């Protein structure tokens, strides 16, 4: 009979590095965390399981960098994310890989070229002195009391240990924190946000496609549904890419046959989601060609290298970002980042629910949302921060994730002078330092 478990013998593994700050995961949060920590003088190692930097920005690919601006009125925008996001935008501009912010009603995104972004991120991390280890996955941790003492990684070379003084978990899934034993939530009452496979269509008539409103696109897709096409989602916008004739689509929706979202921490479900995503891409290609003006000759030119994951573990921190705080546009004195992005919830059904903050409004994220409960030298940043399921739906987009990462990286570096203890970091000094580097903690119309 097949045994249910096997015993894995304990073994010694080589120590690969002993950085001051270890950042795990190189999405927008991890990039910003690593650059900020290295900029502050910490010897910083960034470990990423994929072969390029960028996380969702590159391996999934997005329509635009969202959450950087709030809407002030019909014409004007208010910048709410600064700091390293500005550096990234400048670097993208330098290689003609970014467009000015584009509005879809009250939704604002900054279109970027996800292919050029890969090289831009290599240069940006190098320029800040970040050491990068790609194709390497954090798989386990050692702890002593309230400290994480080692992070074990695996790559083609085998298994090795990293001995950082402070760790910033930007894995999106809170892998390090969870393996250290930190408490976390996985959705609320079994509800998780749905994942999506992203894709790009070439041969798009950008002029006609660019004039379509979200309501018009929805009408086109609803007609397809009425004609018998089983589309899981009809709410979407068209994101024209800096590359001419290319549109980026965020329209698939990956759910189980019973209508619930996949648990994208489970490899079997993840595999099913990847395959279902590619099936849906083919379906939407057919439908867009047939029903949506400007897409008559469109053809899929690119599918994200991996499924896009909106929500998995939300790690418990000293503070929790709540739905009530987001809705009230709370501005706590201990904030280290701001966000104005709406509550964008990809739940069940063909719709996406959007709850907007009042024009020009924003809320602050407390430092405690990054400090993992029960640990001194472990921080989280990005979509796996400490937040309620409903609040994460607002703070999880690229702009705020960069701001959270920058704060976590600077805080991690600052903690080196305070016994590697994140709670000992003097918060006013951290806030001043963030602002001196261009981070925005109190957005104002200029
Ligand atoms: C389908 C979809 C569409 C979206 N559209 C937009 C949009 O248009 N605009 C926008 O601004 N935001 C969008 N978002 C949201 C946004 O992209 C993400 O929430 C944001 O990228 C999260 O950033 P992050 O750094 O926290 O995590 P991620 O971008 O998820 O990066 C995490 C990184 O960690 C790595 N990693 C994970 N585990 C390990 C491990 N154990 N060891 C080593 N490395 C590890 C991963 O490979 C990845 O590179 C979208 C999200 C999805 C899923």
Image: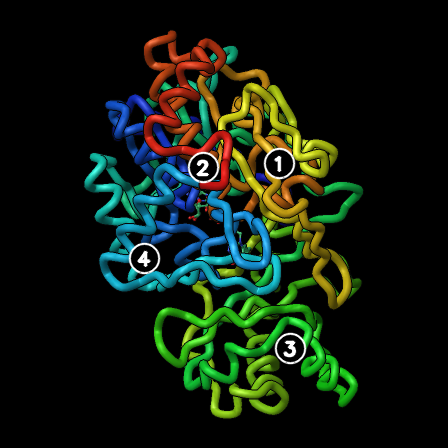
Residue 420 position, x and y percent, is 39, 13
Q: State the residue in front, 428 or 43.
A: 428
Using the image, determine if residue 10 lies above or below residue 446. above
Q: State the residue in front, 326 or 135.
A: 326
Instruction: Give the quadrant of residue 389.
Output: top right
Using the image, determine if residue 254 lies above or below residue 18. below
Which residue, given by chain and number where applicable, does mark 4 sit on? 117
Which residue, given by chain and number where applicable, does mark 2 sit on? 403
Q: Secondary structure at mark 4?
A: helix
Using the image, determine if residue 169 lies above or below residue 400. above
Instruction: Give the quadrant of residue 206.
Output: bottom left
Q: Secondary structure at mark 1?
A: strand
Q: Earlier in the sequence, mark 1 or mark 4?
A: 4
Q: Residues within 10 Å of mark 1 (few under 14, many from 20)?
A: many
Which quadrant of the figure contains the C terminus? Answer: top left
Q: Earlier in the sequence, mark 4 or mark 2?
A: 4
Residue 122 position, x and y percent, is 25, 49
Q: Secondary structure at mark 2?
A: helix
Q: Label 1, label 3: how many angstroms apart (C-alpha)?
A: 33 Å
Residue 440 position, x and y percent, is 45, 33
Q: Is residue 159 among what the camera can see?
A: yes
**Mark 1 in CB contact with mark 3 (< 8 angstroms):** no
**Mark 1 in CB contact with mark 4 (< 8 angstroms):** no
Q: Earlier in the sequence, mark 2 or mark 3?
A: 3
Which residue, given by chain and number where applicable, does mark 3 sit on? 217
Q: Label 2, label 3: how many angstroms apart (C-alpha)?
A: 32 Å
Which residue, given by chain and number where applicable, does mark 1 sit on? 314
**Mark 1 in CB contact with mark 2 (< 8 angstroms):** no
Residue 103 position, x and y percent, is 53, 62
Residue, x 51% and y 66% (percent of image)? Answer: 198
């Amino acid at each position: 009979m097949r045994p249910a478990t096997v015993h894995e013998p304990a073994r010694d593994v080589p120590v690969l590095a002993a950085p001051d700050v270890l950042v795990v995961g190189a999405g927008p949060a991890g990039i910003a965390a690593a650059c900020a920590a290295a900029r502050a003088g910490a010897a910083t190692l960034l470990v990423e399981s994929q072969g390029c930097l960028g996380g969702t920005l590159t391996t999934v690919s997005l329509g635009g960098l969202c959450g950087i601006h709030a809407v002030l009125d019909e014409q004007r925008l208010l910048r709410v994310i600064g700091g390293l996001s500005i550096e990234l935008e400048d670097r993208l501009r330098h290689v003609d890989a970014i467009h000015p912010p584009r509005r879809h009603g009250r939704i604002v995104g900054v279109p970027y070229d996800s292919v050029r972004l890969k090289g831009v991120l290599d240069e940006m991390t190098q320029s800040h002195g970040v050491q990068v280890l790609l194709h390497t996955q954090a798989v386990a941790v050692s702890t002593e009391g309230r400290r994480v003492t080692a992070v074990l990684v695996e790559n083609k070379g085998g298994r090795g240990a990293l001995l950082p003084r402070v760790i910033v978990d930007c894995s999106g899934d809170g892998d390090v924190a969870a393996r250290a034993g930190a408490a976390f939530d996985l959705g609320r009452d079994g509800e998780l946000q749905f994942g999506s496979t992203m894709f790009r269509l070439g041969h798009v008539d950008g002029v006609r496609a660019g004039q379509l409103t979200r309501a018009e696109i929805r009408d086109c897709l609803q007609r397809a549904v009425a004609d018998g096409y089983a589309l899981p989602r009809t709410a979407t916008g068209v994101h024209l890419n800096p590359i001419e004739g290319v549109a980026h689509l965020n329209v698939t929706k990956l759910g189980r046959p019973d209508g619930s979202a996949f648990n994208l921490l489970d490899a079997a479900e993840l595999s099913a989601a990847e395959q279902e995503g590619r099936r849906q891409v083919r379906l939407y290609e057919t439908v867009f060609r047939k029903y949506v003006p400007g897409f008559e000759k469109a053809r899929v030119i690119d599918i994200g290298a991996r499924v896009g994951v909106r929500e998995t573990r939300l790690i418990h921190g000293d503070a929790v970002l709540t739905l009530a705080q987001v809705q009230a546009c709370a501005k706590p004195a201990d904030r280290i980042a701001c966000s104005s992005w709406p509550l964008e919830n990809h739940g069940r059904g063909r719709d996406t629910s959007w709850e907007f903050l009042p024009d020009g409004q924003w809320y602050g994220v407390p430092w405690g949302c990054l400090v993992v409960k029960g640990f001194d030298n472990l921080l989280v940043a990005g979509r796996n921060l400490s937040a309620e399921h409903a609040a994460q739906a607002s703070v999880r987009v690229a702009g705020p994730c960069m701001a959270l990462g920058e704060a976590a990286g600077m805080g991690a570096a600052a903690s080196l002078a305070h016994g590697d203890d994140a709670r000992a970091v003097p918060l006013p000094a951290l806030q001043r330092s963030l602002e001196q580097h261009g981070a925005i903690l109190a957005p104002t119309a200029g």
